[in-house]
Image: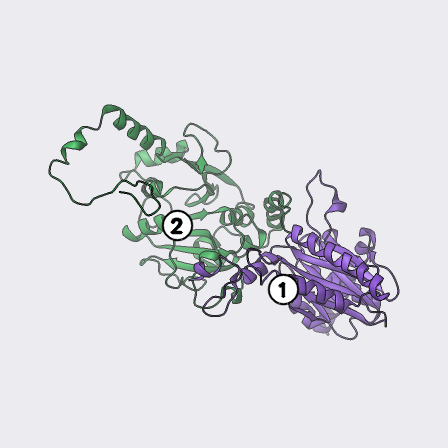
Chain colours: A purple, B green
Amino acid sequence: MTARYDRAITVFSPDGHLFQVEYAQEAVKKGSTAVGIRGKNIVVLGVEKKSVAKLQEERTVRKICALDEHVCMAFAGLTADARIVINRARVECQSHRLTVEDPVTVEYITRYIATLKQRYTQSNGRRPFGISALIVGFDYDGTPRLYQTDPSGTYHAWKANAIGRSAKTVREFLEKNYTEEAIATDKEAMKLAIKALLEVVQSGGKNIELAIIGRNQPLKILESKEIETLVAEIEKEKEEEAEKKKQKKTT
Amino acid sequence: MATFFGEVVPAYSRAVEEGEDDSEEEENEEDREIRNEIQKKREVHVHWNPEITKSIDTSSAKAFQCSDLILAAGPNAAGFLSAFVLSSGSWETVGSVTLWNERCKTTANQQLPVGPSCVFHRPTDKPDVLICQCSCHVAEDQLFQWAEKVLGSIQKTGLTVTVLSDCSVAEYKTPDSVSTIPVPFLRALKTRHYKEAPHCPLLEQPNVITGLPAAVLSHCQVFGIPAVLYQCYSDVVKPDSVTMEAYKPTVSCRSLSRVMKLDSSESVDILKKLVRVNEAQSNLYT
Protein backbone atom coordinates (compact mmCIF):
# COMPACT_ATOMS: atom_id res chain seq x y z
CA MET A 1 0.00 0.00 0.00
CA THR A 2 2.77 2.40 0.87
CA ALA A 3 4.48 1.77 -2.45
CA ARG A 4 2.27 4.20 -4.34
CA TYR A 5 2.71 7.06 -1.87
CA ASP A 6 6.41 7.21 -1.23
CA ARG A 7 7.60 8.13 -4.71
CA ALA A 8 7.19 11.89 -4.55
CA ILE A 9 7.64 14.07 -1.53
CA THR A 10 4.58 16.20 -2.12
CA VAL A 11 2.07 13.40 -1.90
CA PHE A 12 0.05 12.57 1.20
CA SER A 13 -1.03 8.95 1.65
CA PRO A 14 -4.74 8.24 2.22
CA ASP A 15 -4.20 8.01 5.96
CA GLY A 16 -2.32 11.28 6.15
CA HIS A 17 1.31 10.14 6.17
CA LEU A 18 4.19 11.82 4.43
CA PHE A 19 6.23 8.70 3.89
CA GLN A 20 9.39 10.40 2.64
CA VAL A 21 9.58 12.40 5.86
CA GLU A 22 9.10 9.26 7.94
CA TYR A 23 11.76 7.45 5.92
CA ALA A 24 14.08 10.41 6.47
CA GLN A 25 13.62 9.89 10.20
CA GLU A 26 14.77 6.30 9.69
CA ALA A 27 17.91 7.64 8.01
CA VAL A 28 18.61 9.64 11.16
CA LYS A 29 18.61 6.40 13.17
CA LYS A 30 21.51 5.20 11.09
CA GLY A 31 23.79 7.88 12.46
CA SER A 32 25.64 7.38 15.74
CA THR A 33 24.18 8.66 19.01
CA ALA A 34 24.37 12.28 20.11
CA VAL A 35 23.16 13.55 23.49
CA GLY A 36 22.56 17.12 24.66
CA ILE A 37 22.15 18.31 28.26
CA ARG A 38 21.17 21.76 29.52
CA GLY A 39 22.77 22.53 32.85
CA LYS A 40 22.50 25.65 35.01
CA ASN A 41 25.65 27.41 33.76
CA ILE A 42 26.72 25.04 31.04
CA VAL A 43 25.37 23.20 28.02
CA VAL A 44 26.89 19.86 27.06
CA LEU A 45 26.91 17.93 23.79
CA GLY A 46 28.21 14.36 23.78
CA VAL A 47 28.54 12.18 20.69
CA GLU A 48 29.64 8.68 19.88
CA LYS A 49 32.65 9.02 17.64
CA LYS A 50 32.42 7.11 14.40
CA SER A 51 35.25 4.67 13.82
CA VAL A 52 37.54 6.13 11.17
CA ALA A 53 39.38 4.13 8.56
CA LYS A 54 43.10 3.71 9.13
CA LEU A 55 44.19 6.21 6.52
CA GLN A 56 41.48 8.75 7.26
CA GLU A 57 42.22 12.04 9.06
CA GLU A 58 40.27 11.83 12.27
CA ARG A 59 39.84 15.59 12.56
CA THR A 60 37.70 15.75 9.44
CA VAL A 61 35.06 13.38 10.79
CA ARG A 62 33.26 15.70 13.18
CA LYS A 63 29.75 15.46 14.55
CA ILE A 64 29.90 18.63 16.64
CA CYS A 65 30.20 21.94 14.80
CA ALA A 66 30.19 25.54 15.97
CA LEU A 67 27.59 27.73 14.27
CA ASP A 68 28.79 30.91 16.00
CA GLU A 69 30.84 31.72 19.07
CA HIS A 70 27.98 31.04 21.45
CA VAL A 71 26.02 28.35 19.56
CA CYS A 72 27.00 24.89 18.44
CA MET A 73 25.21 21.83 17.16
CA ALA A 74 25.56 18.07 16.90
CA PHE A 75 23.77 16.10 14.19
CA ALA A 76 22.86 12.52 13.39
CA GLY A 77 22.12 11.20 9.91
CA LEU A 78 23.41 11.90 6.42
CA THR A 79 26.81 13.58 6.56
CA ALA A 80 26.44 15.50 3.33
CA ASP A 81 23.04 16.94 4.26
CA ALA A 82 24.47 18.10 7.58
CA ARG A 83 27.25 19.99 5.84
CA ILE A 84 24.73 21.96 3.77
CA VAL A 85 22.55 22.81 6.76
CA ILE A 86 25.55 23.86 8.85
CA ASN A 87 26.92 26.12 6.11
CA ARG A 88 23.55 27.85 5.68
CA ALA A 89 23.19 28.28 9.43
CA ARG A 90 26.67 29.76 9.79
CA VAL A 91 26.01 32.30 7.05
CA GLU A 92 22.71 33.22 8.67
CA CYS A 93 24.39 33.75 12.04
CA GLN A 94 26.83 36.27 10.57
CA SER A 95 24.20 37.91 8.44
CA HIS A 96 22.09 38.41 11.56
CA ARG A 97 25.06 39.93 13.43
CA LEU A 98 25.69 42.43 10.65
CA THR A 99 22.06 43.35 10.06
CA VAL A 100 20.76 43.57 13.60
CA GLU A 101 24.13 44.10 15.38
CA ASP A 102 23.25 41.36 17.88
CA PRO A 103 24.27 37.73 18.02
CA VAL A 104 21.52 35.24 17.16
CA THR A 105 19.47 33.73 19.92
CA VAL A 106 19.55 29.95 19.96
CA GLU A 107 15.85 29.88 19.22
CA TYR A 108 16.28 32.10 16.17
CA ILE A 109 18.89 29.95 14.50
CA THR A 110 16.98 26.79 15.39
CA ARG A 111 13.87 28.25 13.77
CA TYR A 112 15.92 29.13 10.72
CA ILE A 113 17.23 25.57 10.38
CA ALA A 114 13.80 24.09 11.00
CA THR A 115 12.21 26.37 8.38
CA LEU A 116 14.89 25.35 5.91
CA LYS A 117 14.14 21.69 6.56
CA GLN A 118 10.40 22.18 6.27
CA ARG A 119 10.79 23.86 2.90
CA TYR A 120 12.31 20.68 1.55
CA THR A 121 9.30 18.66 2.67
CA GLN A 122 6.95 20.78 0.63
CA SER A 123 8.58 21.27 -2.74
CA ASN A 124 8.53 18.86 -5.62
CA GLY A 125 11.57 17.03 -6.85
CA ARG A 126 13.47 17.43 -3.57
CA ARG A 127 13.85 15.03 -0.72
CA PRO A 128 13.91 16.08 2.95
CA PHE A 129 17.19 16.55 4.80
CA GLY A 130 18.08 13.29 6.47
CA ILE A 131 19.42 14.77 9.69
CA SER A 132 18.26 15.63 13.17
CA ALA A 133 20.19 18.29 15.05
CA LEU A 134 20.76 19.19 18.68
CA ILE A 135 21.48 22.91 18.95
CA VAL A 136 22.90 24.29 22.19
CA GLY A 137 24.09 27.67 23.33
CA PHE A 138 23.52 30.72 25.52
CA ASP A 139 21.32 33.69 24.64
CA TYR A 140 22.73 37.17 25.32
CA ASP A 141 20.72 37.33 28.54
CA GLY A 142 22.69 34.35 29.78
CA THR A 143 19.98 31.68 29.58
CA PRO A 144 21.22 28.25 28.49
CA ARG A 145 19.20 26.63 25.70
CA LEU A 146 18.93 23.22 24.06
CA TYR A 147 16.79 22.65 20.96
CA GLN A 148 16.22 19.63 18.78
CA THR A 149 15.14 19.64 15.11
CA ASP A 150 14.14 16.70 12.94
CA PRO A 151 13.70 16.08 9.18
CA SER A 152 10.08 17.19 9.22
CA GLY A 153 11.07 20.72 10.21
CA THR A 154 9.68 20.68 13.75
CA TYR A 155 11.74 22.00 16.62
CA HIS A 156 11.31 21.88 20.38
CA ALA A 157 13.23 23.01 23.43
CA TRP A 158 14.48 20.28 25.72
CA LYS A 159 16.20 19.96 29.08
CA ALA A 160 18.03 16.89 27.80
CA ASN A 161 17.63 14.80 24.67
CA ALA A 162 19.32 12.27 22.41
CA ILE A 163 19.24 11.57 18.65
CA GLY A 164 20.61 8.87 16.37
CA ARG A 165 21.04 5.15 16.93
CA SER A 166 19.62 3.88 20.27
CA ALA A 167 18.27 7.36 21.03
CA LYS A 168 15.28 5.80 22.76
CA THR A 169 17.48 3.97 25.28
CA VAL A 170 19.46 7.11 26.05
CA ARG A 171 16.33 9.21 26.40
CA GLU A 172 14.87 6.72 28.89
CA PHE A 173 18.11 6.87 30.86
CA LEU A 174 17.95 10.67 30.88
CA GLU A 175 14.31 10.67 32.00
CA LYS A 176 15.32 8.59 34.99
CA ASN A 177 18.53 10.42 35.85
CA TYR A 178 18.06 14.07 34.91
CA THR A 179 17.47 15.62 38.31
CA GLU A 180 18.31 18.99 39.81
CA GLU A 181 21.20 17.49 41.72
CA ALA A 182 22.47 15.65 38.67
CA ILE A 183 23.08 18.97 36.92
CA ALA A 184 23.99 20.97 40.04
CA THR A 185 27.55 21.67 38.87
CA ASP A 186 29.20 21.85 35.46
CA LYS A 187 31.15 18.69 36.14
CA GLU A 188 28.05 16.77 37.14
CA ALA A 189 26.31 17.79 33.92
CA MET A 190 29.29 16.56 31.88
CA LYS A 191 29.32 13.29 33.81
CA LEU A 192 25.61 12.84 33.17
CA ALA A 193 26.19 13.21 29.42
CA ILE A 194 29.00 10.64 29.52
CA LYS A 195 26.93 8.26 31.63
CA ALA A 196 24.06 8.50 29.16
CA LEU A 197 26.37 7.72 26.24
CA LEU A 198 28.06 4.84 28.03
CA GLU A 199 24.68 3.12 28.08
CA VAL A 200 24.85 2.61 24.33
CA VAL A 201 28.44 3.17 23.23
CA GLN A 202 30.11 -0.15 22.89
CA SER A 203 33.78 0.56 23.39
CA GLY A 204 33.66 2.89 26.36
CA GLY A 205 35.29 6.28 26.82
CA LYS A 206 37.61 6.11 23.84
CA ASN A 207 34.72 6.55 21.45
CA ILE A 208 33.07 9.52 23.14
CA GLU A 209 33.56 13.15 22.19
CA LEU A 210 32.29 15.92 24.46
CA ALA A 211 31.78 19.62 23.79
CA ILE A 212 30.75 22.24 26.33
CA ILE A 213 29.80 25.90 26.26
CA GLY A 214 29.89 27.86 29.49
CA ARG A 215 28.14 31.19 30.00
CA ASN A 216 30.17 33.92 28.18
CA GLN A 217 32.73 31.32 27.17
CA PRO A 218 33.52 29.92 23.75
CA LEU A 219 32.93 26.35 22.64
CA LYS A 220 35.38 23.89 24.17
CA ILE A 221 35.87 20.36 22.87
CA LEU A 222 37.30 18.16 25.59
CA GLU A 223 40.50 16.23 25.00
CA SER A 224 40.42 12.49 25.27
CA LYS A 225 42.48 12.63 28.47
CA GLU A 226 39.89 14.78 30.19
CA ILE A 227 37.13 12.43 29.07
CA GLU A 228 39.05 9.44 30.36
CA THR A 229 39.43 11.15 33.75
CA LEU A 230 35.69 11.70 33.92
CA VAL A 231 34.99 8.12 32.84
CA ALA A 232 37.34 6.85 35.55
CA GLU A 233 35.48 8.96 38.13
CA ILE A 234 32.15 7.60 36.95
CA GLU A 235 33.38 4.01 37.22
CA LYS A 236 34.71 4.66 40.71
CA GLU A 237 31.34 6.09 41.75
CA LYS A 238 29.61 3.04 40.30
CA GLU A 239 31.86 0.72 42.26
CA GLU A 240 31.25 2.66 45.46
CA GLU A 241 27.50 2.42 44.86
CA ALA A 242 27.76 -1.32 44.33
CA GLU A 243 29.85 -1.68 47.52
CA LYS A 244 27.29 0.30 49.51
CA LYS A 245 24.47 -1.88 48.21
CA LYS A 246 26.38 -5.03 49.09
CA GLN A 247 27.02 -3.76 52.59
CA LYS A 248 23.38 -2.86 53.03
CA LYS A 249 22.38 -6.38 52.04
CA THR A 250 24.74 -8.07 54.48
CA THR A 251 23.88 -5.85 57.52
CA MET B 1 1.81 -6.12 -32.83
CA ALA B 2 2.51 -2.40 -32.48
CA THR B 3 1.97 -0.84 -29.07
CA PHE B 4 0.82 2.64 -28.18
CA PHE B 5 4.35 3.98 -28.30
CA GLY B 6 5.03 2.50 -31.73
CA GLU B 7 7.39 -0.29 -30.72
CA VAL B 8 6.85 -3.71 -32.17
CA VAL B 9 6.28 -6.40 -29.55
CA PRO B 10 6.01 -10.10 -30.43
CA ALA B 11 2.51 -11.27 -29.68
CA TYR B 12 2.30 -14.37 -27.54
CA SER B 13 -0.71 -16.54 -28.09
CA ARG B 14 -1.94 -19.24 -25.79
CA ALA B 15 -3.80 -20.99 -28.58
CA VAL B 16 -2.20 -24.35 -28.98
CA GLU B 17 -1.67 -25.44 -32.51
CA GLU B 18 -1.43 -29.04 -33.58
CA GLY B 19 2.02 -30.10 -34.47
CA GLU B 20 3.70 -27.95 -31.87
CA ASP B 21 5.07 -31.03 -30.11
CA ASP B 22 7.22 -31.73 -33.12
CA SER B 23 9.14 -28.50 -32.64
CA GLU B 24 10.73 -29.79 -29.44
CA GLU B 25 12.65 -32.47 -31.27
CA GLU B 26 14.18 -29.81 -33.43
CA GLU B 27 16.18 -28.48 -30.48
CA ASN B 28 19.65 -29.13 -31.65
CA GLU B 29 22.54 -30.79 -29.97
CA GLU B 30 24.12 -27.44 -29.12
CA ASP B 31 21.13 -26.10 -27.18
CA ARG B 32 20.92 -29.31 -25.19
CA GLU B 33 24.59 -29.18 -24.42
CA ILE B 34 24.37 -25.57 -23.26
CA ARG B 35 21.40 -26.38 -21.07
CA ASN B 36 23.25 -29.32 -19.50
CA GLU B 37 26.29 -27.18 -18.89
CA ILE B 38 24.28 -24.51 -17.13
CA GLN B 39 22.56 -27.13 -15.00
CA LYS B 40 25.92 -28.64 -14.07
CA LYS B 41 27.34 -25.24 -13.22
CA ARG B 42 24.44 -24.45 -10.93
CA GLU B 43 24.57 -27.79 -9.18
CA VAL B 44 24.91 -27.76 -5.40
CA HIS B 45 27.88 -29.78 -4.13
CA VAL B 46 27.99 -31.01 -0.55
CA HIS B 47 31.40 -32.11 0.78
CA TRP B 48 31.76 -34.01 4.02
CA ASN B 49 34.99 -34.90 5.79
CA PRO B 50 36.22 -38.52 5.55
CA GLU B 51 34.77 -39.54 8.94
CA ILE B 52 31.26 -38.47 8.05
CA THR B 53 31.57 -39.83 4.52
CA LYS B 54 32.46 -43.20 6.03
CA SER B 55 29.47 -43.21 8.40
CA ILE B 56 27.20 -42.25 5.49
CA ASP B 57 28.55 -45.07 3.32
CA THR B 58 28.40 -47.71 6.03
CA SER B 59 24.85 -46.93 7.18
CA SER B 60 21.86 -48.60 5.61
CA ALA B 61 19.99 -45.34 5.04
CA LYS B 62 23.04 -43.63 3.47
CA ALA B 63 22.86 -40.97 6.17
CA PHE B 64 24.76 -40.15 9.35
CA GLN B 65 23.32 -39.73 12.80
CA CYS B 66 22.73 -36.24 14.14
CA SER B 67 20.41 -35.09 16.91
CA ASP B 68 20.53 -31.31 16.50
CA LEU B 69 21.12 -29.33 13.33
CA ILE B 70 21.45 -25.59 13.81
CA LEU B 71 21.46 -23.58 10.61
CA ALA B 72 22.27 -19.86 10.39
CA ALA B 73 21.18 -18.17 7.17
CA GLY B 74 22.42 -14.62 6.76
CA PRO B 75 25.39 -12.59 8.02
CA ASN B 76 23.89 -11.60 11.36
CA ALA B 77 22.71 -15.10 12.23
CA ALA B 78 26.11 -16.48 11.25
CA GLY B 79 27.82 -13.75 13.29
CA PHE B 80 25.66 -14.59 16.30
CA LEU B 81 26.73 -18.23 16.13
CA SER B 82 30.37 -17.24 15.68
CA ALA B 83 30.31 -15.00 18.72
CA PHE B 84 28.20 -17.01 21.14
CA VAL B 85 28.55 -20.62 20.09
CA LEU B 86 31.76 -21.16 18.16
CA SER B 87 33.80 -18.95 20.48
CA SER B 88 33.90 -21.42 23.36
CA GLY B 89 34.82 -25.08 23.32
CA SER B 90 36.65 -26.81 20.52
CA TRP B 91 35.06 -27.18 17.12
CA GLU B 92 36.00 -29.00 13.95
CA THR B 93 34.93 -28.21 10.41
CA VAL B 94 33.23 -31.29 9.04
CA GLY B 95 31.77 -30.20 5.74
CA SER B 96 30.87 -27.46 3.33
CA VAL B 97 28.45 -26.69 0.53
CA THR B 98 29.72 -25.07 -2.64
CA LEU B 99 27.48 -23.66 -5.30
CA TRP B 100 27.57 -21.10 -8.07
CA ASN B 101 25.03 -18.47 -8.94
CA GLU B 102 25.17 -14.86 -10.06
CA ARG B 103 25.48 -13.62 -6.50
CA CYS B 104 27.70 -16.29 -5.01
CA LYS B 105 30.58 -17.37 -7.15
CA THR B 106 32.44 -20.18 -5.42
CA THR B 107 33.78 -22.98 -7.58
CA ALA B 108 33.19 -26.62 -6.77
CA ASN B 109 36.86 -27.55 -6.64
CA GLN B 110 37.80 -25.07 -3.94
CA GLN B 111 38.91 -27.07 -0.94
CA LEU B 112 38.55 -24.35 1.68
CA PRO B 113 35.71 -22.00 0.85
CA VAL B 114 36.82 -18.40 0.93
CA GLY B 115 34.33 -15.58 1.47
CA PRO B 116 30.59 -16.23 1.54
CA SER B 117 29.79 -19.94 1.67
CA CYS B 118 28.14 -22.64 3.76
CA VAL B 119 30.31 -24.39 6.35
CA PHE B 120 29.43 -27.16 8.80
CA HIS B 121 30.99 -27.30 12.27
CA ARG B 122 30.72 -29.89 15.02
CA PRO B 123 31.87 -29.73 18.65
CA THR B 124 34.50 -32.34 19.40
CA ASP B 125 32.81 -33.32 22.65
CA LYS B 126 29.26 -33.56 21.28
CA PRO B 127 29.51 -35.15 17.85
CA ASP B 128 25.76 -35.32 17.40
CA VAL B 129 25.33 -31.53 17.16
CA LEU B 130 25.89 -29.95 13.76
CA ILE B 131 26.09 -26.22 13.09
CA CYS B 132 25.87 -24.74 9.61
CA GLN B 133 26.70 -21.12 8.84
CA CYS B 134 25.38 -20.13 5.46
CA SER B 135 26.25 -16.60 4.46
CA CYS B 136 26.06 -16.98 0.68
CA HIS B 137 22.99 -16.42 -1.42
CA VAL B 138 21.28 -19.63 -2.55
CA ALA B 139 19.34 -18.99 -5.77
CA GLU B 140 15.69 -20.02 -6.07
CA ASP B 141 16.48 -22.87 -8.45
CA GLN B 142 19.13 -24.25 -6.09
CA LEU B 143 17.08 -24.22 -2.88
CA PHE B 144 15.44 -27.60 -3.40
CA GLN B 145 18.78 -29.23 -4.21
CA TRP B 146 20.40 -27.67 -1.16
CA ALA B 147 17.74 -28.95 1.21
CA GLU B 148 17.61 -32.40 -0.41
CA LYS B 149 21.36 -32.95 -0.46
CA VAL B 150 22.10 -31.62 2.99
CA LEU B 151 19.12 -32.99 4.87
CA GLY B 152 19.25 -36.15 2.80
CA SER B 153 22.66 -37.02 4.28
CA ILE B 154 21.31 -36.76 7.83
CA GLN B 155 19.16 -39.46 9.38
CA LYS B 156 15.63 -38.25 9.97
CA THR B 157 14.95 -40.13 13.20
CA GLY B 158 15.89 -38.24 16.33
CA LEU B 159 16.75 -35.08 14.40
CA THR B 160 15.66 -31.58 15.46
CA VAL B 161 16.40 -28.64 13.19
CA THR B 162 16.74 -25.03 14.38
CA VAL B 163 17.09 -22.29 11.81
CA LEU B 164 18.15 -18.69 12.51
CA SER B 165 17.70 -16.24 9.68
CA ASP B 166 17.97 -12.50 8.98
CA CYS B 167 15.38 -10.43 7.21
CA SER B 168 14.90 -6.75 6.57
CA VAL B 169 12.16 -5.12 8.63
CA ALA B 170 10.98 -3.38 5.46
CA GLU B 171 9.48 -6.71 4.43
CA TYR B 172 7.49 -7.13 7.64
CA LYS B 173 3.81 -6.49 7.08
CA THR B 174 1.78 -5.29 10.00
CA PRO B 175 -1.32 -3.15 10.42
CA ASP B 176 0.50 -0.99 12.98
CA SER B 177 3.24 1.40 11.99
CA VAL B 178 6.64 -0.27 12.02
CA SER B 179 8.13 2.68 13.87
CA THR B 180 6.23 1.60 17.00
CA ILE B 181 7.84 -1.84 17.17
CA PRO B 182 11.28 -1.95 18.81
CA VAL B 183 13.60 -3.19 16.08
CA PRO B 184 15.26 -5.73 15.87
CA PHE B 185 12.76 -8.38 16.92
CA LEU B 186 12.29 -12.14 16.53
CA ARG B 187 9.42 -14.12 15.09
CA ALA B 188 9.13 -17.91 14.99
CA LEU B 189 7.67 -20.50 12.64
CA LYS B 190 7.65 -24.24 13.38
CA THR B 191 6.71 -27.55 11.77
CA ARG B 192 3.89 -29.71 13.01
CA HIS B 193 6.20 -32.15 14.78
CA TYR B 194 8.04 -29.51 16.81
CA LYS B 195 6.62 -29.80 20.30
CA GLU B 196 8.68 -27.25 22.24
CA ALA B 197 7.17 -23.77 22.62
CA PRO B 198 9.11 -21.15 20.63
CA HIS B 199 10.73 -18.38 22.68
CA CYS B 200 9.19 -15.48 20.79
CA PRO B 201 5.82 -14.75 19.15
CA LEU B 202 4.87 -16.77 16.08
CA LEU B 203 5.06 -15.06 12.71
CA GLU B 204 1.78 -13.32 12.00
CA GLN B 205 -0.09 -13.44 8.70
CA PRO B 206 0.35 -12.28 5.91
CA ASN B 207 4.12 -12.45 6.39
CA VAL B 208 5.92 -15.27 4.56
CA ILE B 209 9.36 -16.76 4.85
CA THR B 210 11.36 -17.10 1.64
CA GLY B 211 14.69 -18.51 0.57
CA LEU B 212 16.85 -21.08 2.30
CA PRO B 213 14.97 -21.12 5.64
CA ALA B 214 11.73 -21.77 3.76
CA ALA B 215 13.25 -24.63 1.77
CA VAL B 216 14.64 -26.26 4.92
CA LEU B 217 11.41 -25.84 6.85
CA SER B 218 9.33 -27.22 3.98
CA HIS B 219 11.59 -30.25 3.72
CA CYS B 220 11.26 -30.86 7.45
CA GLN B 221 7.49 -30.51 7.37
CA VAL B 222 7.20 -32.98 4.48
CA PHE B 223 9.42 -35.58 6.14
CA GLY B 224 8.01 -35.07 9.64
CA ILE B 225 11.20 -33.65 11.19
CA PRO B 226 10.60 -31.30 14.15
CA ALA B 227 12.00 -27.92 13.12
CA VAL B 228 11.72 -24.32 14.26
CA LEU B 229 12.78 -21.10 12.53
CA TYR B 230 13.66 -17.88 14.37
CA GLN B 231 13.57 -14.95 11.95
CA CYS B 232 15.14 -11.70 13.10
CA TYR B 233 13.70 -8.57 11.51
CA SER B 234 16.23 -5.76 11.62
CA ASP B 235 16.69 -2.37 10.04
CA VAL B 236 20.35 -3.12 9.31
CA VAL B 237 21.09 -5.79 6.70
CA LYS B 238 24.87 -5.69 7.06
CA PRO B 239 26.57 -7.40 10.04
CA ASP B 240 25.56 -5.37 13.09
CA SER B 241 26.17 -6.20 16.73
CA VAL B 242 22.74 -5.08 17.96
CA THR B 243 21.05 -7.40 15.46
CA MET B 244 23.34 -10.28 16.39
CA GLU B 245 22.53 -9.82 20.05
CA ALA B 246 18.82 -9.88 19.22
CA TYR B 247 19.11 -13.65 18.75
CA LYS B 248 19.97 -14.10 22.44
CA PRO B 249 16.46 -15.23 23.54
CA THR B 250 16.96 -18.40 21.51
CA VAL B 251 19.38 -19.65 24.16
CA SER B 252 16.43 -21.19 26.00
CA CYS B 253 15.78 -23.42 23.00
CA ARG B 254 16.82 -26.98 23.80
CA SER B 255 19.16 -27.47 20.84
CA LEU B 256 20.96 -24.17 21.31
CA SER B 257 21.27 -24.40 25.09
CA ARG B 258 23.49 -27.43 24.58
CA VAL B 259 26.16 -25.38 22.86
CA MET B 260 25.59 -21.69 23.62
CA LYS B 261 27.49 -19.76 26.26
CA LEU B 262 26.14 -16.25 26.75
CA ASP B 263 28.57 -14.81 29.28
CA SER B 264 31.81 -15.31 27.46
CA SER B 265 33.94 -12.18 27.24
CA GLU B 266 35.31 -13.44 23.96
CA SER B 267 31.88 -13.04 22.42
CA VAL B 268 32.07 -9.28 22.82
CA ASP B 269 35.46 -9.17 21.13
CA ILE B 270 34.30 -11.34 18.26
CA LEU B 271 31.19 -9.18 17.80
CA LYS B 272 33.33 -6.07 17.65
CA LYS B 273 35.67 -7.63 15.13
CA LEU B 274 32.83 -8.80 12.90
CA VAL B 275 31.30 -5.36 12.86
CA ARG B 276 34.41 -3.23 12.70
CA VAL B 277 35.27 -4.09 9.10
CA ASN B 278 31.92 -2.82 7.94
CA GLU B 279 31.65 0.39 9.91
CA ALA B 280 34.71 2.24 8.75
CA GLN B 281 33.88 1.94 5.09
CA SER B 282 30.64 3.89 4.95
CA ASN B 283 30.83 7.66 5.15
CA LEU B 284 27.20 8.18 4.27
CA TYR B 285 25.93 8.44 7.84
CA THR B 286 27.57 10.15 10.81
**Closer to the camera in the image, B273 or B25:** B25
- Identify which residue is drawn at 69% across, 66% down: A148
Q: Which mark is residue A88?
A: none
Q: Chain of mark 2?
A: B
Q: CA distance from mark 1 to mark 2?
A: 44 Å
Q: What residue do we see at 45% from left, 47% from top?
A: B73
Kindly identify which residue carries mark 1: A118
Instruction: Residue B35: give x, y in percent of width and height.
Output: 29, 30
Rendering quarter of residue B148:
top left
Residue B125 visible here = yes
Where does the image place residue B164, in percent across and percent down from the top left?
A: 45, 52
- Look at the picture and state if A139 lies above or below B208: below
Tag nearer the camera, 1 or 2: 1
Q: Secondary structure at mark 1?
A: helix
Q: Residues within 10 Å of mark 2 (few under 14, many from 20)?
A: many
> Residue A87 sits in which quadrant?
bottom right
Please give left or right for residue A1 compared with residue A65 in the image: left
Q: Chain of mark 1?
A: A
Residue B82 x/y as whole percent: 53, 46
Within 10 Å of the Cα at label 1, are there few (<14), some (14-19), or many (20+) other Cα atoms? Answer: some
Residue located beneath label 2 in the image: B213
Quadrant the N terminus of chain A occupies:
bottom left
Left or right: A124 in relation to B156? right
Amino acid at dot 1 = Gln
Amino acid identity at mark 2: Pro
Could you tell whether B254 is left or right of B221 in the image?
right
Residue A204 sits above or below residue A40 on the image: above
As drawn, the residue found furthest toward the right would be: A216
Residue A101 pos. (x, y %): 86, 65
Does residue A238 appear anywhere in the picture? no
Between A221 and B81, which is closer to the camera in this rendering? Answer: A221
Among the 4 quarters of the image, the one containing residue A89: bottom right
